[in-house]
């Protein structure tokens, strides 16, 4: 069992959620509530990482993060190291790859709130911020929870993008899914088996958690 | 206490689309103005404009001695700054809160120590003291309607707006709710607007009637004529 790889995977999952949830809540709500020109295009762009082969996504991310790109140059001058093949680069790539897993469930969550309920909150004297925190967030909660769990589970299972952008640096960018591949290449079936079983247990566990929690929320809301 | 003219609701709305509206009316405290007409005639749009949830092309809305909307001077008070109590057609209760929580939400203007007792008092007023810990899905249509009414009153509104309040309840409940609203009208002394497509509501509750029409400027008339 590669404990360092498990640690990288868990940190990557938690970091991805921490970065993406605030962005996803803002953006998902925007898409759910507002009508604007070019919305269809924006929705298509949000979904793109879902349908692109991970290698294609990884390729574009590498180009975007490279030393000749403005982002890569800015990161290097700030931190003193390159963005590709670093944990930070991997985290950013993971956040981008997970956008559809986060934005879509949150968008559906906000869409499920009837517009009358929003209006009623305004007529109750709640300011826009109070409406958001006291009415909208609790009602969109199942969508937000699904988004967090999906992003976490997907990050744990991501392989192509991780290998392209992060490489295979032990303790830095080698995640559990990459470690499994690595062990298989070395004919170490036993280690690969243990790690695969670990990922399987985590995946089943998170999905059970989503179902239980959304059922509980369902009962609470009726 | 302000005089009647200060507490009067006066509304002037003019718009060509999406729903053509040309209205000019007032409603005095203690009066019930029924806005009667078929679906799609813009009845709800009138209430939503008064509440500040909709901005018509041209509007001058005055209530509570304040200017709420004036498109000419670009004055516009957002809904949370208007002392409006509104009962929505489908009640629009907050599904994650109990009846008590729903009413307390509209009591933000009161000190927090008073909110609970005031909400209990209001639920008592609409005969729901026994159901204050139930969530909306555990209540019947008529009970939800009463919670919505208590929540609208919690705001201590200067204007009470009822959008098809009896549309989703049966005839017996409807009669009882009509009586309760009639009783409220006498005690509240605020302008009360009632949108309906059922003439029974007009007959039983209205003191004034407005029928929105596109043919000419719509004004309110005393009812019964």
Image (cartoon, coloured by chain):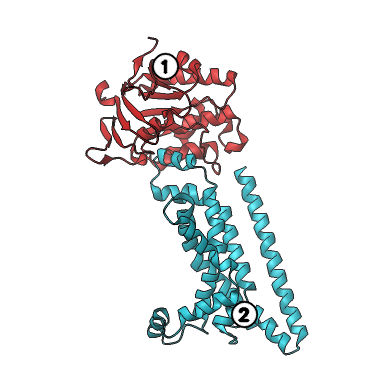
Chain colours: A cyan, B red
Question: Would you name the residue on which mark 1 appears?
Answer: B206
Against A197, residue B35 (above or below) is above
Residue A25 position, x and y percent, is: 49, 58
Classify the position of the N terminus of chain B by image quarter.
top left
Work out which residue is located at the far front of the displayed protein and give it.
B215
Residue, x 51% and y 51% (percent of image)?
A110
Q: Is residue A2 visible?
A: no
Rounded to the nearest angstrom, the CA distance separating label 1 from label 2 is: 71 Å
- Local crowd size for mark 2, using a 10 Å CA cut-off: few (<14), some (14–19), many (≥20): many
Outermost residue on the right side: it is: A190
Q: Quadrant of residue A190?
A: bottom right
Q: From the viewer's perspective, is residue B103 above or below residue A133?
A: above
* Residue A20 appears left or right of B70: right
Residue A58 seen: yes
Residue most extreme to the left:
B73
Circle 1 — which element?
loop
In contact (CB < 8 Å): disc 1 and disc 2: no
Element under label 2? loop
Q: Which residue is mark 2?
A: A175
Counting the numbered discs, the total is 2
Q: Residue at x 51, y 63 (%)?
A: A46
Q: Nearer the viewer, residue A52 or B188?
A: A52
The answer to whether dots 1 and 2 both sit on one chain is no
Give how far across and how far down residue B225 sits, in percent. 37, 9
Q: Nearer the viewer, residue B198 or A87?
A: B198
Q: Nearer the viewer, residue B98 or A84?
A: A84
| Label 2 chain ID | A
């Amino acid at each position: 069992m590669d404990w360092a790889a498990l640690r990288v995977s868990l940190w990557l999952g938690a970091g991805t959620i921490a970065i993406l949830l605030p962005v996803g809540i803002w953006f998902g709500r925007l898409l759910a509530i507002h009508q604007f020109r070019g919305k269809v295009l924006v929705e298509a762009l949000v979904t793109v990482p879902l349908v692109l082969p991970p290698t294609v996504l990884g390729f574009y991310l590498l180009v975007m993060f490279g030393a000749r790109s403005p982002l890569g140059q800015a990161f290097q001058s700030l931190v003193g190291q390159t963005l590709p093949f670093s944990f930070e680069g991997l985290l950013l790539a993971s956040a981008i790859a997970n956008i559809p897993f986060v934005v879509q469930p949150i968008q559906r969550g906000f869409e499920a709130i009837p517009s009358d309920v929003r209006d009623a909150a305004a007529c109750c004297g709640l300011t826009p911020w109070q409406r958001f925190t006291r009415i909208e967030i609790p009602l969109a909660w199942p969508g937000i929870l699904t988004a967090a769990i999906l992003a976490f589970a997907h990050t744990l299972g991501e392989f192509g993008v991780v290998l392209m952008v992060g490489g295979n640096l032990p303790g830095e960018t080698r995640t559990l899914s990459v470690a499994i591949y690595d062990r298989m290449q070395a004919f170490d079936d036993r280690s690969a088996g243990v790690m695969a079983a670990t990922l399987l247990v985590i995946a089943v566990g998170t999905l059970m958690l989503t179902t239980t929690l959304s059922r509980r929320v369902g009962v609470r809301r009726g | 206490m302000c005089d009647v003219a200060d507490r009067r609701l006066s509304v002037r709305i003019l718009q060509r689309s999406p729903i053509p509206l040309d209205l000019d009316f007032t409603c005095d405290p203690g009066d019930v103005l029924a806005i009667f007409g078929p679906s799609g005639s813009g009845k709800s749009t009138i209430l939503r404009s008064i509440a500040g949830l909709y901005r018509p092309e041209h509007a001058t809305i005055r209530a509570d001695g304040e200017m709420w909307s004036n498109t000419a001077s670009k004055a516009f008070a957002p809904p949370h700054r208007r002392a409006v109590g509104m009962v929505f057609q489908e009640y629009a209760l907050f599904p994650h809160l109990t009846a008590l929580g729903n009413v307390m939400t509209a009591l933000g203007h009161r000190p927090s120590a008073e909110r609970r007792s005031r909400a209990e008092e209001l639920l008592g007023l609409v005969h729901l003291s026994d159901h204050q810990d139930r969530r909306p899905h555990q209540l019947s249509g008529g009970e939800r309607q009463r919670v919505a009414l208590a929540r609208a009153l919690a705001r201590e509104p200067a204007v009470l707006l009822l959008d098809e309040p009896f549309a989703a309840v049966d005839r017996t409940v409807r009669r009882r709710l009509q009586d309760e609203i009639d009783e409220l009208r006498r005690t509240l002394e605020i302008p009360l607007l009632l949108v309906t497509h059922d003439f029974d509501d007009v007959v039983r509750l209205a003191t004034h009637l407005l029928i929105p029409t596109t043919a000419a400027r719509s004004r309110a008339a005393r009812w019964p004529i």
